Image (cartoon, rainbow, N blue to C red):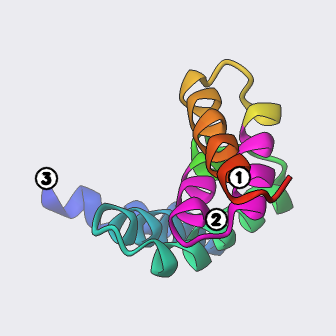
Amino acid sequence: MDEFFQYEDMFKSQDEIALENAVNNAIVHFQNQDFAASLPFIVEAIEICEKFGIGIPNLFLMKAFAEMQTGKLADALNSINMEIAYFPTNTRAYELKSEIEALNSGQGIF
């Protein structure tokens, strides 16, 4: 049975493998609360998705949260707006947007 799973990667394209790796690395760093390290992997995953016209829910949400945690509030607001544009039923995105806007108003960025 284990041999079956060893051949799984033979049928994936280079881009599929790159996307999986980027998402997996992003999640590992994100779970370890190393948000600065997660950002390049999230960006890579988003770029691959955009190249092929696909969307993965919560990628922009993760990006926004990581940007918020690293003090990039304007970028975080842009990212969360992208999540909402692509996935308008994502209620967590609206909650995070409110958090980002509250932080932004506290710092006088707007």
Q: Which disc, if any, is residue 30? A: none
Who's the residue at 75% across and 50% down the image? 77
SS label for mark 1 = helix
> Mark 3 — residue?
1
Q: Which disc, if any, is residue 104? A: 1
- Figure quadrant of residue 81: top right
Tell whether 82 sits left or right of 57. Answer: right
> Mark 2 — residue?
45
Q: Position of residue 34 (x, y in %)?
A: 38, 75
- The amino acid on which the numbered mark 2 sits, given as a three-letter code, is Ala
Circle 3 crowding by C-alpha within 10 Å: few under 14, some 14–19, many from 20: few
Dot placed on the residue nearer the N-terminal end, 2 or 1: 2
Who's the residue at 48% across and 71% down the image? 21
- The amino acid on which the numbered mark 3 sits, given as a three-letter code, is Met
Range of residues picked out in magenta: 62-83
- The amino acid on which the numbered mark 1 sits, given as a three-letter code, is Asn
Who's the residue at 54% across and 29% down the image? 92
- Figure quadrant of residue 101: top right
Which numbered disc, 3 or 2, marks the residue closer to the eye?
Answer: 2
Q: Position of residue 79 (x, y in %)?
A: 74, 53
